[in-house]
Amino acid sequence: MKFQVQNKTMDSFAFSSLTDVIFQLLIFFMLTASFVSHSGIKVELPKASEGTPPSNQQHITISITNQNQIFLNNSEISMESLRGQIKSAIQNMTNPIVILNADKDVNLQKAIEIIDIAKSVGCTKYLLATDVQKEVNLNNGSTE
């Protein structure tokens, strides 16, 4: 018995496996994009009923924990070196915005001292980060 070997080219290509891979990548990037915005510093922000997120302008973030630890862009620094660190962080920025993430239990005087230091090196715009609590209207499901 003799077997014949046929060398035929395939006329069609199955796109289903390629579509599955692209769909999985799309889901992966959509899910991971929502996790990027949170820093690893544990700060319990004060509550607010309304607020707007910062725009895409250049900014630096200063965080103060309830143990009075100070972080500049997620790097812990001392109060004495804060002035120099802010100055070097904003040297290439035009109109930088200082976002202050202060724990709700932090003394207001500490926050004012940090704003004064930022003001002394040339920062003019400040945002206080809050945890915005949106109320849900149970009648029609919309947020107010």
Image (cartoon, rainbow, N blue to C red):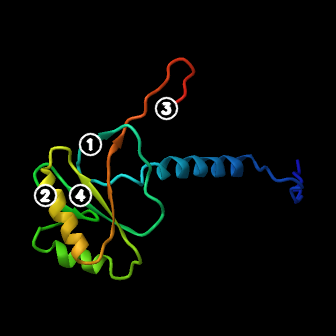
Q: Check contact, mark 1 vs mark 2: CB within 8 A.
A: no
Amino acid bearing label 3: Glu
Q: What label sits on residue 46 in the rendered view?
A: 1
Residue 79: x and y, percent? Answer: 11, 68
The one nearer the camera, 33 or 76, is: 76
Q: Which residue is mark 2?
A: 110
Q: CA distance from mark 2 to mark 3?
A: 33 Å
Q: Earlier in the sequence, mark 2 or mark 3?
A: 2
Q: CA distance from mark 1 to mark 4?
A: 13 Å
Q: What label sits on residue 63 in the rendered view?
A: 4
Q: Is residue 109 left or right of residue 46?
A: left
Q: Check contact, mark 1 vs mark 4: CB within 8 A.
A: no
**Secondary-structure class at tag 1:** loop
The one nearer the camera, 5 or 98, is: 98
Residue 100: x and y, percent? Answer: 27, 58
Amino acid bearing label 1: Pro
